[in-house]
């Protein structure tokens, strides 16, 4: 019942944006309470509060953006900042520090960034996949 009310208000894309925002916010909280172990990656030089803010602030903004549709595009864009930063940290650790750790983590961050950008692609009507795809994601509402 509540799920249908939320979908009616924010739409399917807004619901996905809100869900990802909640996940990002909880990840920020997790980074604060359980900081990553130090293995020599650049993002580990940031203190726990900075790493928590890197995840939580875009998450909170995405939740607001899902409710306030005019901020939709900015919310989708900000969601790719934390995983993009982690991806760059893994790549920089490999290039500059010789870190040969779990490449699976870097691949997962890359997949998340690509998925977020694919979900947000429906915002641009000039994109080749923006027409019918957008109508399907928004239930025909603009």
Image (cartoon, grey):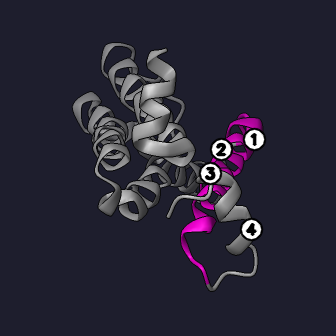
Residue found at the far bottom of this picture: 126
Q: Quadrant of residue 2?
A: top left
Report the side of 81 relative to 123 (left or right).
Answer: left
Cα–Cα gap, marks 2 and 1: 10 Å
Question: So how many labels did they put on this image?
Answer: 4
Q: Quadrant of residue 69?
A: bottom left
Cα–Cα gap, marks 3 and 2: 46 Å
Q: Nearer the viewer, mark 1 or mark 3?
A: 3
Cα–Cα gap, marks 1 and 3: 38 Å
Q: Which residue is mark 2?
A: 99
Q: Regarding mark 2 in the picture, which secondary structure is present there?
A: loop
Q: Nearer the viewer, mark 2 or mark 4?
A: 4
User: Could you tell me which residue is drawn at 37 percent across and 62 percent down?
Assistant: 74
Residue 53's spot in the image, x, y percent?
27, 38
What span is in magenta? 100-125
Magenta region includes residue 139: no
Counting residues from the start of the chain, the first of labels 2 and 4 encountered is 2
Residue 96's spot in the image, x, y percent?
58, 59
Residue 94's spot in the image, x, y percent?
66, 52
- The mark found on residue 139 in the picture is 3
User: Could you tell me which residue is drawn at 37 percent across and 38 percent down?
Assistant: 55
Magenta region includes residue 117: yes
Cα–Cα gap, marks 4 and 3: 10 Å
Q: Which residue is mark 4?
A: 132
């Amino acid at each position: 019942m509540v799920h249908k009310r939320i979908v009616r208000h924010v739409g399917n894309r807004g619901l996905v944006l809100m869900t990802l925002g909640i996940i990002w916010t909880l990840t920020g909280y997790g980074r604060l309470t359980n900081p990553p172990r130090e293995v020599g990656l650049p993002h580990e030089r940031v203190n726990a509060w900075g790493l928590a803010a890197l995840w939580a602030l875009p998450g909170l903004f995405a939740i607001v953006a899902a409710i306030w549709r005019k901020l939709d595009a900015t919310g989708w864009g900000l969601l790719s900042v934390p995983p993009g930063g982690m991806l760059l940290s893994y790549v920089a650790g490999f290039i500059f520090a010789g870190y040969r750790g779990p490449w699976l983590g870097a691949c997962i961050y890359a997949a998340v960034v690509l998925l977020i950008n694919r979900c947000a692609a429906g915002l641009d009507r000039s994109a080749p996949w923006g027409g019918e795809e957008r109508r399907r994601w928004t239930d025909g509402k603009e």
